[in-house]
Amino acid sequence: MQIRTRLTILFTLIATCTLAGVLIVAFVVYRKSSEAEFYHSLETKAELAAKSNFSKLENWKALPQTWIEPESDTVNYSDNLSLYNDNYQRVYTLHPDAVPVPAKALQDAFQYGSVQFKQYNLLAFGKRISLEGKPPSVVIVEGRWNASEAIKIRNILIICFFLGVSLLAISGWYFAGQALAPVSRIMNEVDALYPTNLNQRIRMRRNNDEIGRLTQTFNRMLDRVEYAFRMQRLFLSNVSHELRNPLTAIQTQLDVLLQRERTKEIYEKALQSVLEDVRAISSVEEQLHQLARIYNDPNAIAFEPVRIDEILLQAKSRIQKRRSTPKIVLDLPQMPENDAILFVHGNEELLLTAFVNLLDNACKYAPEGAVILRALFHNNGAHEIFVIDQGKGIPTDEQALIFEPFYRSPRHLQIKGTGIGLPLVQSIFKLHGATLSILKSNETGTIFQILFPVQPSNSNLA
């Protein structure tokens, strides 16, 4: 069942129940009001009868019992006037065969002064009177209430009810269609999207309602889908290039070596070159593996308290083993007295990989001068780490691109690289809730800043 049909049925049911309740209440109120007016007329007749009919009545003896019990709930007279003495005996009546009033009604009339009750198909009103020189008595006026007006009103309300239900169903179907029209439009626009036109977006409306937020959600999802497709195409083209080059170099060198006998020195030199190419392939594979691990299943990565200063020391040591220049200076201007402050919640292997890649990148593109690794530790755990080099800087138009996977600056194509390092670094820090940004970059060098988030209680991490 479609949503439009369900909404129409639900709206019609709710409106129908509401309409039925209102009409029933209106009919009941009208009927009660009509009966109250009729009882009021009976009361007026009782007062007139007490003043005119019974003030001159001489015989107050009980009348003989000549009435006959009706076979149904209907009596054969339409009205009656009776008088009962304090012994509950009828002393006057217009219809001698009329059914006597129940003793309970007379008792209530004597006790409370008046009473309203139903006598078969008649409505009756009893009023206690006290005539001069006479014992207390009760006047009973009976009359047939004409229900034809109430029946007419009831029939009109029933007709109005069914007409109203029909109009409500039609209105509900129309308004449900109007409410869901933007959703249908969004569905049609999404259906028209293909991998070849993922740059298109769903048209936004000015109003910021639920449909507008749904459109924004779809567009954000399309941004991610377009980014994933673009990364996939970029991955296929760049990875094939990064793997093909060293593999081609290995094959070429081995083919040349096998053409004829070589000296030991040439073999050693060739094997050293092949080893470098294998290490390059292994590095690309390792970086791709870690990048895929972060993107595919970040929840499976184990986090634990780790000391950030020890990670920085390990990263510095690894880079110095790889490169003799430039010199790496670890600057820790103010170490906290409480070692627990140095702990952060994270994955030691990934954090070490991030700092190693960031330092290696600084050394690669700034071979002259020193690379400074500076750390400012704060009591709340929001530590600041700076990687400062003395290179030629990063142009403004490239600063956003260097974090895109496989991006290589045209200025450094002669330097070996994969274009995976900085995107991997940024993904790792983002996984840890930290931010990586370029604080400054000009012809005198570049400063990368890593800002960690506020950590939980240090005592819980230590």
Image (spheres, rainbow, N blue to C red):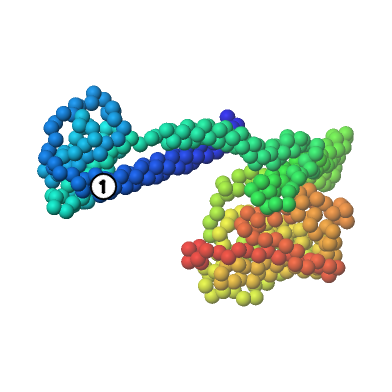
Characterize the local packing of mark 1: few (<14), some (14-19) or many (20 or more) Cα atoms within 10 angstroms: few
For this view, does 80 lie left or right of residue 169? left
Front-most of residues 122 and 439: 122
Against 333, residue 320 (above or below) is above
Q: Residue 379's x, y, as percent?
A: 56, 72
In the picture, which quadrant includes the N terminus? top right
Against 239, residue 339 (above or below) is below
Q: Residue 387's x, y, as percent?
A: 72, 66
- Give, as a three-letter code, the residue at label 1: Ser
Give the residue displayed 78% in from the left and 68% down from the top: 440
Give the residue displayed 79% in from the left and 43% down from the top: 199
Front-most of residues 328 and 361: 361
Q: Residue 156's x, y, as percent?
A: 50, 34
Give the residue displayed 68% in from the left and 72% down from the top: 331
- Asked whether the viewer can see residue 321, the reply is no
Q: Residue 107's x, y, as percent?
A: 17, 45
Q: Quadrant of residue 27?
A: top left
- Asked whether the viewer can see residue 366, the reply is yes
Front-most of residues 333 and 382: 382
Residue tagged 1: 52
For this view, does 26 lie left or right of residue 72? right
Q: Quadrant of residue 282?
A: top right
Give the residue displayed 54% in from the left and 75% down from the top: 337
Q: Helix or strand or loop: what does disc 1 sit on?
A: helix
How many numbered circles does the render carry? 1
